[in-house]
Image: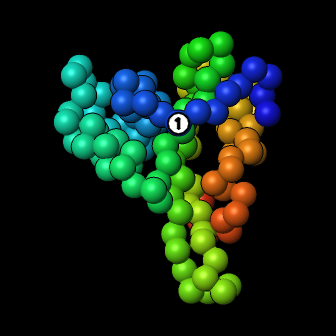
Amino acid sequence: MSAGMRLREAKREDLPTIVRMLADDPLGQKRHRVEDPLPKDYYAAFDAIAASPSNALYVAEIDGAIVGTLQLTFIPGLDYLGAERMMIEAVRVARHRRNAGLGKAILAEENPQATAAALLAFFAQA
């Protein structure tokens, strides 16, 4: 783990920071709208994620500042004797913290939910 990094579940008030990170690359600039206030669609999506026992949205913090994010989705399956699979997506690191191994540290962070699930897919969208 990166020194001093803490992974925690995202809160609704984290959304502006999360959306800024999602939009902070050439592809994200095309898919996201960073506005004040944020479009209500982001809050509706957050509420759906938070209400679902199969989804989790996390932020990484260093010294109380959000420096990264990722979403986990747990998918039940019949294969492998009913093994649950985990999809990792929307992994982002704040621009000023990139190229220092923080993304790797976020993915490596122990998560009690993730330890029992098989990794199904890591989505890198173009």
Does any portion of residue 5 appear in the rendered image? yes
Q: Quadrant of the N terminus?
A: top right
Task: Give the image location of residue 92, x and y in percent.
Answer: 55, 37
Does any portion of residue 98 appear in the rendered image? no
Image point (60%, 72%), residue name: 84
53, 63: nearer the viewer: 53
In this picture the colour scheme is rainbow
Looking at the image, residue 115 lies above or below residue 10: below
Query: For the residue marked with disc 1, what is the amino acid?
Result: Glu
Task: Give the image location of residue 42, x and y in percent.
Answer: 28, 39
Image point (36%, 49%), residue name: 51
Task: Give the image location of residue 112, x and y in percent.
Answer: 68, 50
Few, some or many C-alpha atoms within 10 Å of disc 1 (few <14, some 14-19, many ≥20)?
some
The residue that disc 1 covers is 9
Q: From the viewer's perspective, is 126 left or right of 59?
A: left
Image point (54%, 53%), residue name: 72
